[in-house]
């Protein structure tokens, strides 16, 4: 740490000089001016880290000339009591005392100039409990205790410090309470989903930090999971409809969904009365329970759709999908310049924007312009993107991946044009083409979160055709354009004599 003196001194002096005679008649020289300058620096040196029993040198500096310095001084400001050697010089020293835990005494270095002005600076010396032959253990800090409601996703960061090295490893373990699954336990971040509880439940976690010399330390933190108690009313018939004029209420609310972190979404109808539908307006709402937003209402224009096509309502018998970060995906019915073949789309609300991801009756992404999306059958949505299943040219099932910007064709069943699997992926003849593909062998109208995870890996089921593989089937994985086999029909099952 560096201290700088700035100042101005006004000297009003009457100087009388009497010439003293000498044998040769000469006079003496008045001498050089050793007055300290108006500004100068004082530096106590850089902070240090040492171990008990080690020699510590405190080296102070100033840009004053020695002839301009009246005094140096070192003194202790705080911390464990220490005796300084040569405390009245620019360089003092001491032997670091024995300590049970890390100590940080603070020392002050002062310089007094020959004008009587004193400038000071301070330095911190960290003394570790270790020795050269027995380095100190690190310090673990698991952080503050938490209180969270059941089903909340918890993300909590722990810390580690080491006076004579670096932290090389972290590890979280649960030591008490209702068991939870810790995601990536060998990191500095504790992540898990709080369980549902009746009453309150104490979960205790231990953080272990290991330094680069193999020493370790632990610390505990508690998470109290609280019972959510009575249900919170998000929306109800007769309540004011969020986003509409003050005289509108919820005429109906339906098909609610909730994400992992508490974001909700639901469809409904807003109107000025619960006794008629004269001013009825279909809509989608989403957000946190205490901060709902109107996402789309009947007649709204949607990004990605022509100006003469608008949102009308939600798809029949479908439920929206809400991701961990609050993105919402849903089927939508359209109005305007559409017909029965083109009035269905899958839409997504990402951030503050809502857009059309894919629409029936338009050119099929990844295929020649003559190929048309003839139907949309399901989707899965996470923070890594959306997996969509649909039909191409009436009879060919297809899968697409949406990365929030573009749609990529993953697989399609088409006997005339083989979308083949890489030869090394499956055991059977690579000439086989997909006979059917779906993100779930028993796929419904909405996949409700299956098919793609938060890391962007997609899983889908495929049947194959052609003479050599008429009974072939497999579950495949896809990520970043790479296809892999997870399991195929007739693979042996571990620890079983039969095949599946």
Image: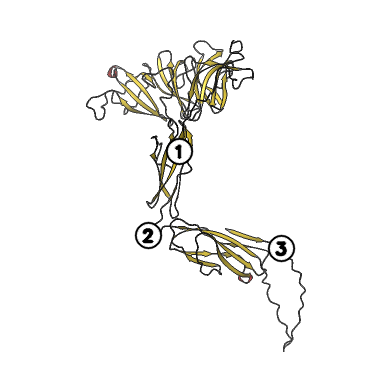
Identify the residue position indicated by label 3 in the image.
8
**Callouts 3 and 2 close, C-beta under 8 Å:** no
- Mark 1 or 2: in front is 1
Q: Is residue 194 left or right of residue 20?
A: left
Q: Which mark is residue 223?
A: 1
10 is higher (above) or lower (below) than 26: above
| Pointer 1 or 2: first along the chain | 2
Q: Quadrant of residue 355?
A: top right
Does any portion of residue 273 appear in the rendered image? Answer: yes
Where the N terminus falls, by quadrant? bottom right
Q: For label 2, count other residues whose C-alpha is less than 10 Å away and answer few (under 14), some (14-19) or many (20+).
A: few
Q: CA distance from mark 3 to mark 1?
A: 60 Å
Q: Give how far across and how far down residue 38 sits, in percent.
A: 68, 64
Secondary structure of the residue carrying tag 2 is: loop
Labelled disc at residue 133: 2
Name the N-terminal-most of marks 3 and 1. Answer: 3
- 377 or 133, which lies in front? 133
User: Residue 134: percent from the left, percent from the top?
Assistant: 38, 58
**Residue 7 spot, x, y in % from top left:** 69, 62
Q: Quadrant of residue 302?
A: top right
Give neighbour class at mark 3: few <14, some 14-19, many 20+ (Cα, 10 Å): few
């Amino acid at each position: 740490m560096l201290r700088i003196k700035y100042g101005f001194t006004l000297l009003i002096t009457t100087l009388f000089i009497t010439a003293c005679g000498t044998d040769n008649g000469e006079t003496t020289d008045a001498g050089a001016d050793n007055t300290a300058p108006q500004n100068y620096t004082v530096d106590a040196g850089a902070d240090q880290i040492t171990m008990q029993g080690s020699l510590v040198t405190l080296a102070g500096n100033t840009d004053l000339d020695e002839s301009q310095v009246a005094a140096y001084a070192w003194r202790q400001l705080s911390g464990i009591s220490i005796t300084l050697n040569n405390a009245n010089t620019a360089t003092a020293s001491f032997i670091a005392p024995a300590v049970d835990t890390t100590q940080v005494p603070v020392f002050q270095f002062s310089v007094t100039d020959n004008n009587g002005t004193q400038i000071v600076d301070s330095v911190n010396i960290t003394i570790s409990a270790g020795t050269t032959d027995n380095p100190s253990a690190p310090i673990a800090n698991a952080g503050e205790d938490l209180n969270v409601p059941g089903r909340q996703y918890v993300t909590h960061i722990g810390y580690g410090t080491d006076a004579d090295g670096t932290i090389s490893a972290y590890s979280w373990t649960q030591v008490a309470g209702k068991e939870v699954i810790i995601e990536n336990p060998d990191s500095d971040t504790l992540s898990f989903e709080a369980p549902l509880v009746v009453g309150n439940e104490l979960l205790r976690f231990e953080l272990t930090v290991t330094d680069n010399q193999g020493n370790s330390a632990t610390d505990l933190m508690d998470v109290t999971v609280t019972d959510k108690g009575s249900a919170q009313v998000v929306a109800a018939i007769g309540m004011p409809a969020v986003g509409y004029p003050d005289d509108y209420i919820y005429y109906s609310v339906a098909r609610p969904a909730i994400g992992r972190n508490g974001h909700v979404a639901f469809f409904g109808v807003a109107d000025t009365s619960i006794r008629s539908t004269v001013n009825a307006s279909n809509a989608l709402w989403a957000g946190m329970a205490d901060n709902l937003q109107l996402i789309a209402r009947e007649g709204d224009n949607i990004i990605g759709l022509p100006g003469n096509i608008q949102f009308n309502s939600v798809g029949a018998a479908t439920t929206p999908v809400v991701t961990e970060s609050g993105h919402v995906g849903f089927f939508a019915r359209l109005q305007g310049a559409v017909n029965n073949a083109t009035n269905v789309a899958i839409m997504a609300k990402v951030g503050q924007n809502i857009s059309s991801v894919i629409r029936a009756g338009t050119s099929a992404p990844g295929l020649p312009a003559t190929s048309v999306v003839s139907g949309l059958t399901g989707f899965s949505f996470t923070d890594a993107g959306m997996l969509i299943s649909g039909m191409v040219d009436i009879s060919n099932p297809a899968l697409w991946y949406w990365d929030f910007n573009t749609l990529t064709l993953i697989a399609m069943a088409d006997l005339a044009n083989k979308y083949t699997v890489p030869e090394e992926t499956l055991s059977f003849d690579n000439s086989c083409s997909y006979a059917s593909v779906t993100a779930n062998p028993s796929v419904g109208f909405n996949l409700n979160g299956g098919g793609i995870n938060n890391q962007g890996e997609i899983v889908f089921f495929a049947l194959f055709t052609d003479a050599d593989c008429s009974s072939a089937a497999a579950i495949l994985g896809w990520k970043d354009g790479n296809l892999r086999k997870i399991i195929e029909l007739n693979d042996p099952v571990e620890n079983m004599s039969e095949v599946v």
